[in-house]
Image: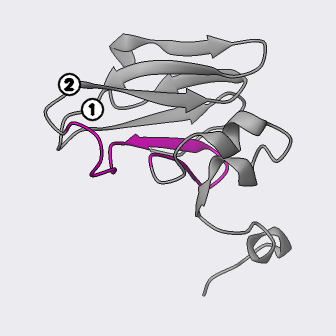
């Protein structure tokens, strides 16, 4: 037997562009929607997807909306913090690399 809360049906899409969570942040619209996505309300996925970029480059620019974002794949790298209007960070972006950051104020059972 499965129990679902009422909120389960109203949460929305699991995989979504940043502007779904930050509709008033113009930069969330401006940055690549395929490379900067939210997985639910808690996780931000940063992945190199554009064939127009140089696939051999080891770094790529990703947009992070305002707040604190902690790297869950590489906790030794710490958290990215921005208290103002969002910021761009250069992160490793090889052809087989991706970044997952946990949003401030959220928890994920592991």
> Which residue appears at 75% of the width and 48% of the height?
21
**Decide: marks 2, 1 in contact (CB < 8 A)?**
yes
Q: Which residues lie in the magenta part?
A: 35-54
Q: Which residue is mark 1?
A: 93
Image quadrant where one finds the N terminus: bottom right
Label 2: how many residues lie within 10 Å, few (<14), some (14-19) or many (20+)? Answer: few
Image quadrant where one finds the C terminus: top left
Q: Which residue is mark 2?
A: 58
Cα distance between the residues tagged 2 and 1: 5 Å
Q: Position of residue 53 (x, y in %)?
A: 28, 40
Q: Is residue 52 left or right of residue 102?
A: left
Q: Secondary structure at mark 2?
A: loop
> 27 or 67: nearer the eye?
27
Q: Is residue 53 magenta?
A: yes
Q: Position of residue 32 (x, y in %)?
A: 52, 46
Q: Is residue 18 above or below residue 2?
A: above
> Which residue appears at 69% of the width and 22% of the height?
86
């Amino acid at each position: 037997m499965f129990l679902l809360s009422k909120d389960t049906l109203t949460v929305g899409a699991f995989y979504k562009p940043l502007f779904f969570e930050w509709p008033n942040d113009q930069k969330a619209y401006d940055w690549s929607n395929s490379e900067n996505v939210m997985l639910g309300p808690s996780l931000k996925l940063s992945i190199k997807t554009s064939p127009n970029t140089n696939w051999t480059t080891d770094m790529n620019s990703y947009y992070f909306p305002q707040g604190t974002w902690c790297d869950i794949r590489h906790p030794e790298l710490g958290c990215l913090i921005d208290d103002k209007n969002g910021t761009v960070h250069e992160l490793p972006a090889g052809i087989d690399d991706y970044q997952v950051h946990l949003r401030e104020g959220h928890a994920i059972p592991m």
